[in-house]
Amino acid sequence: MPTTLTIEDVERIARLANLELTQDEKQLFTKQLADILAYAEQVQGIDTTGVEATAHVNAHAVDRPDEPRPSLEVSEAVANAPDAAPQAGLFRVPRVI
Amino acid sequence: MTAFATAREIRDAIVTGEASAVEFTRAALARIDQTNPTLNAFNHVVAERAIARATLIDQQRAAGATLGPLAGVPVALKDNLCVKGVRTTASSKILDTFHPPYSATVVDKLESAGAVIVGKTNCDEFAMGSSNENSAYGPVRNPWASDRTPGGSSGGSAAAVAAQCVPVALGSDTGGSIRQPASFCGVVGLKPTYGRVSRYGLLAFASSLDQIGPFTRTVGDAAVALSALSGRDPMDSTSSSEAVPDFAAALTGNIRGVRVGVPRAFVAEGVDDTVRRAFDAALAVLRDAGATLVDVELPHARYAIPVYYLICTAEASSNLARYDGVKYGHRAATTRDDTLTTMYSRTRDEGFGAEVKRRIMLGTYVLSAGYYDAFYLKALQVRTLLRQDYARALELADVIVMPTSPTPPFRLGEKTDDPLQMYLADIFTVSVNLAGLPGVSIPCGFTDGGDRLPLGFQVIGRMFDEATMLRVADAHERATPWAKSVAPV
């Protein structure tokens, strides 16, 4: 499956990734991502029939009980926000509707 | 005494009263001031905080308290490690003003061991890069040659240790970001087993690969630092409850009969001649010290670069979704007519540098419908084959050795126009992260000729067997002059 990449593909991925790319960036990434993906295609020739996927290498279970525990104060959580309403303990964002 | 001493010498001098923690801290701060205009290794220095901590250590000594294993030792932190109230940027514009409300577990552990944090080091943005040229605060220069990169992504930490600003600096290693800059700067760089050190408070890049570890000038200091950093942490569910040995006690100097695996077929491909000669010399040193060299095969290691870049970008695209201009960091200017989505997208375009955007794009692509099976899932399956290669090789051998980088430190600007060429520089380091194994890069000589650039090789151990790995590295260090070489900065 040879990978071809168009500027429309790059625009679609940028939308999925919430990145507002400039026209120059779109053109640059169309070429660079195509080069990288063409190189990465070599993995598709490896026989992986019946091979499990390794998403992580933990030998132990990583579950924990879902119990409330102390965490950040609201005032600390909003302290770094570019636009917060600290008294109300809220983040302010542009209109949604 | 000055900051030029090792961590163990500094601690001993403070315990015996030969010098104070404040003196060592002042010496480190002065050395940073002296070298930073050239090297750009530090993003910011926390002089007042450091002097206050050092004063506390001196007071503890005066009061007769037992001092920790890193008492009074000046330490630098890669700027992707959170320190409560101390600016932490990951060398990204998007976090330019971020002051974390909590500290990383490694920071608490260092400070309970008595270490004095002096500053935050420059790195590639969000630890994405192999040359430190992807920093929003400018590149770091190599202390051995100012036209060369210090490697990356933890270039500032490597340069800070090589330039003798500090005896210990922490970095993070997702695909070689501790070991490769250690090799380029002629110092020791240790990536622990995945799960050995808590990642809580490390700004995440690729969570199944990231590990925090130390840079030092000696293997002994790396062992002391690793013991201080390791252990189970309830705040990181992937941290291991495996017992933490006294790693320094494992450095006996005796490697008689230790089986050192050499993946000759893998190493034969695309290695610079000068790197090969230094690596062969390192093998001879280990053999002369009593180790048995055995040939091992890693048939899937040649696929490590594509597998790594498919997996790490997928994880990065997810981890970096949190930078949206709402909770912290930069937010793009908007008008009344702009929507929330426009604010997100514009903020991320303004805040992220080119390499970070490239990786988010690549990761989003390989996780998207129609490409997931062909790229992402396939990479996870080859990761399994690669782990099996290492498991088999580590039945025949106690450790595996290979060069850390296929080339000596390259020139600033040499690879910046071609991301794929930059990725290929990671060929010997990324497979270790994919397999979750520990690896340590140590110096093994210099390039011939006038420029005298550092070269390194890495020792790779079994899961949670850093002790044997460090014993082999230490035996090499004892038999060679490299740890005593001083960068001419």
Image (tube, coloured by chain):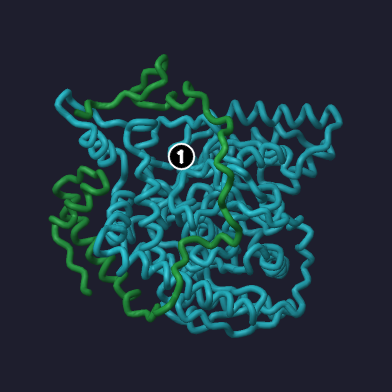
Residue furthest front as drawn: A66
- Res B303 quadrant in image: bottom left
Picture mark count: 1
User: The residue marked by circle 1 belongs to what chain?
Assistant: B
- What amino acid is labelled 1 in the image? Pro
Residue furthest top as drawn: A87
- Res B425 quadrant in image: bottom left
Colour of chain A in the rendered structure image? green
Above or below, comparing residue B303 to residue B209 in the picture = below
Question: Horizontally, is B355 left or right of B436 in the view?
Answer: left
| Percent position of residue B381, x then y | 42, 71
Q: Is B245 in front, or is B158?
A: B245
Residue, x 66% and y 41% (percent of image)?
A: B110
Answer few, some or many: residues within 10 Å of disc 1's Cα (few below 14, many 20 plus, some between 14 and 19).
Answer: few
| Percent position of residue B233, x then y | 63, 45
For the colour cyan, the matching chain is B
Assign the N terminus of chain B to one quadrant of the image: top right
- Res A83 quadrant in image: top left
Residue, x 27% and y 66% (percent of image)?
A: A37
Q: Is B251 in front, or is A3?
A: A3
Q: Is B325 in front, or is B400?
A: B325
Above or below, comparing residue B92 to residue B275 in the picture = above
Per the image, the residue denoted by label 1 is: B37
Residue, x 52% and y 28% (percent of image)?
A: A72
